[in-house]
Image (spheres, helix red, strand yellow):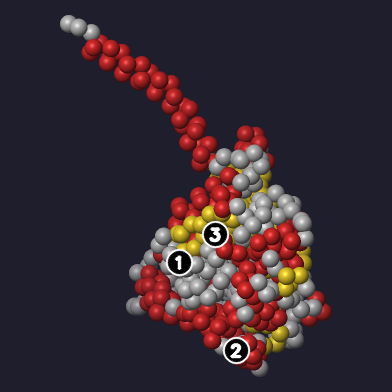
Amino acid sequence: MLYQLYESQRALLSPFAEFASASSKLYNHPLSLFTHTPLAQRVSAGLDLMHRLAKEYEKPEFNITSVSIDGVDVAVQQQTALKKPFCRLLRFKRFTDHLPMLSRMKDQPTVLVVAPLSGHHATLLRETVRELLRDHKVFITDWTDARMVPVQDGPFHLDDYVTYVQEFIRHIGPDVNVISVCQPTVPVLAAVSLMASAGEPTPRTLTMMGGPIDARKSPTAVNNLAMNKSHSWFEHNVIYRVPVNYPGSGRRVYPGFLQHAGFIAMNPDRHLKSHYDYFLDLMRGDDGNGSAEFHRDFYDEYNAVLDMPAEYYLDTIKVVFQDFALVNGTWSVNGDLVRPQDIKTSALLTIEGELDDISGAGQTRAAHGLCTGIPKSRQFHYDAVGAGHYGIFSGRRWRDNVYPQVRDFIAAHQSGAVQPAATLRRAAARKAAAPQVAVAAKKAVAHKAARRKPK
């Protein structure tokens, strides 16, 4: 019933949200007479904020049409490589007529980014993908909103998530490098473990970022909620059926609007201040400045949420946060025991944010204690100083600190030990400077010899 009430409220507020948007423009358009009335800027700002608080946020687009690689503009086309009922495997295909760059791109590693199925859409990793495209061929999992999947397509469990990841890895090929961000670290580790146990080729590298491999370590507010409430509590309090106005009518889900309320409740003061600052920017007439535009872009993404299949959500609560089945060695997927110690050929990199308030310190690093079959020389860990949860895959710290670590780690574990692009650039710079260095050295030797001659 709660989902139906929410939909009724949304339908009721929709025309008011559109009215607020139109009225806001009426009070700030340069050709409108209302723009010159007293308090026009304040009224426009208030109406704009009202519109953003009441509007419905649709799934955003990646909008990655090009990327600059060492000064060369490379076109990017989004393609669907594989389609499943609950997920699409997307490929970002790069094109250029710059022959040296084309030759270089052909030899670059392939990366599969496994996006989280935990409320937000895969577009939350837009900046992750954009950076990776500079040095890699990139695929990403684009999870489908459960309310858009007809009941006839069946349920979706955590075991199905693991199976999906395995299918995607097999589709791309054994040379793939897998990056899992947050929630998928657990099912990705399970998928690769099962492939190793079955004697299948495993990915060249595994990069795990800010995920709850062992949620017992440094538990956060998210962990505490999952651990302190019973499994039946979640089933009876957060699971609802999709209303009749969606293709998935009747499907049991954890609704996106409840997840969004939980996200806001974690840091209400921060969100309140952000909206107030946005209002002040609009009042000052700074509508097009960086701050106001950043606010719009961030909340267009942050407020767009999807419904999760009830079976998958409840399985995750039990397996990851209550039974700790992965670290206890008791997790079976479709009857097969998950054994991370069977992974032997993949290299492992774990990344944690110093200020991560979703996956606490040590939770991701725990993967090293499970993957005992991987030689220590192929295991690495990186702590992103000053980075919160989102900072390890987006923003300045991702671009300047985390991404270079990921890029160099992947490059160092490819066939033939391909050197990272940064290393190649440094080598080229040293080579270009070699003649000048040689001349300077000769001059220095001649100068010393002249000083040693007796007068």
Residue under numbered circle 2: 230
Q: Which mark is residue 350?
A: 3
Residue drawn 80% across and 76% down? 153
Q: In x, y percent, where is residue 201?
A: 74, 53
| Horizontal side of residue 1 vs 198, given as left or right | left
Q: In x, y percent, where is residue 204?
A: 66, 51
Residue drawn 35% across and 20% down? 440
Q: Which of disc 2 and disc 1 is earlier in sequence?
A: 2
| Category of crowding for the residue at label 2, using alpha-carbon neighbours closer than 10 angstroms: few (below 14), some (14–19), many (at least 20) | few
Residue under numbered circle 1: 388
Q: Which of disc 1 and disc 3 is earlier in sequence?
A: 3
Work out whether residue 451 or residue 438 is closer to the camera in this orientation and state it: 451
Kind of residue indicated by mark 2: Ser
Kind of residue indicated by mark 3: Thr
Q: CA distance from mark 3 to mark 2?
A: 30 Å
| Category of crowding for the residue at label 1, using alpha-carbon neighbours closer than 10 angstroms: few (below 14), some (14–19), many (at least 20) | some
